[in-house]
Image (tube, rainbow, N blue to C red):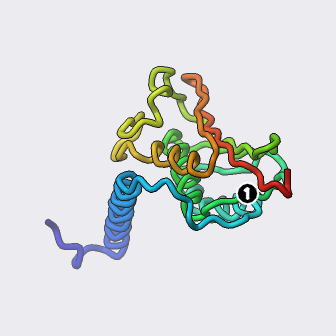
Amino acid sequence: MMSIQGASPETQAAGKSRIRRQVERMGKMVTEFLEFTRGDKTTSNVIETDYAQFVNEIIDELRPELTARSVAIELATPLPRATVLIDPTRLVHVFYNLVGNACDAMTGGGKIQIRLARKHPEVVTEIEDGGKGIPPQMAQRLFEPFATYGKAGGTGLGLSICKRVIEDHHGRIEVRSEPGHGAIFLFTLPLVASTE
């Protein structure tokens, strides 16, 4: 293994950045394995949440990383007034996973669109990418544990965990895709009665 002590500052910075990304990737894999094996069907930390504000905050957190990967992210619809009962930590994981997958599907950059809509008695979230799409036979298996498509270094657990989280919130998740036309991941969450 070559020492980076004698390397230029730029080479050292690049090396440290690679190490940091690898550590983050390994940490994510460990987290996914733990979440998957936990088998916990509870949403014990649920709170009443302004969903539009929640989504806006996630987009603001994700934007710098996506910009660095030449990917734009935008809300394609006006934000509806919607209050949901969620476990924010678990739902953030769903957004990070779906947006991360969308970003990975567009290796040359592109745009991710997020759409929110109130459809009584739930709020619908769509995350659309401009990637190459998913073949129908793979789309049917995508939420199964260890199913992967077009992604190197993944565990194949991310989408099955997303499915579990959404179902634990009494929602549903699905994918719509035509090869060559990107993919849309859609999930629903029940509205709190006062905002229905």
* Residue at the disc numbered 1: 84
Q: Which amino acid does label 1 sit on?
A: Val
* Residue in the foreground of this view, choosing between 145 and 95: 145
- Residue 191: x and y in percent read 77, 51
Residue at the spot 78% in from the left edge and 58% down from the top edge: 83
Q: Is residue 1 left or right of residue 183?
A: left
* Residue in the foreground of this view, choosing between 19 and 137: 137
In the picture, which quadrant includes the N terminus? Answer: bottom left
- Residue 18: x and y in percent read 34, 63
* Residue in the foreground of this view, choosing between 7 and 64: 64
Residue at the spot 33% in from the left edge and 47% down from the top edge: 153
- Whether 87 is drawn above or below 188: the answer is below
Q: Is mark 1 on a helix, strand or loop?
A: strand
* Residue in the foreground of this view, choosing between 58 and 91: 91
Q: In this view, does 93 lie to the left or right of 148?
A: right
- Residue 71: x and y in percent read 59, 49
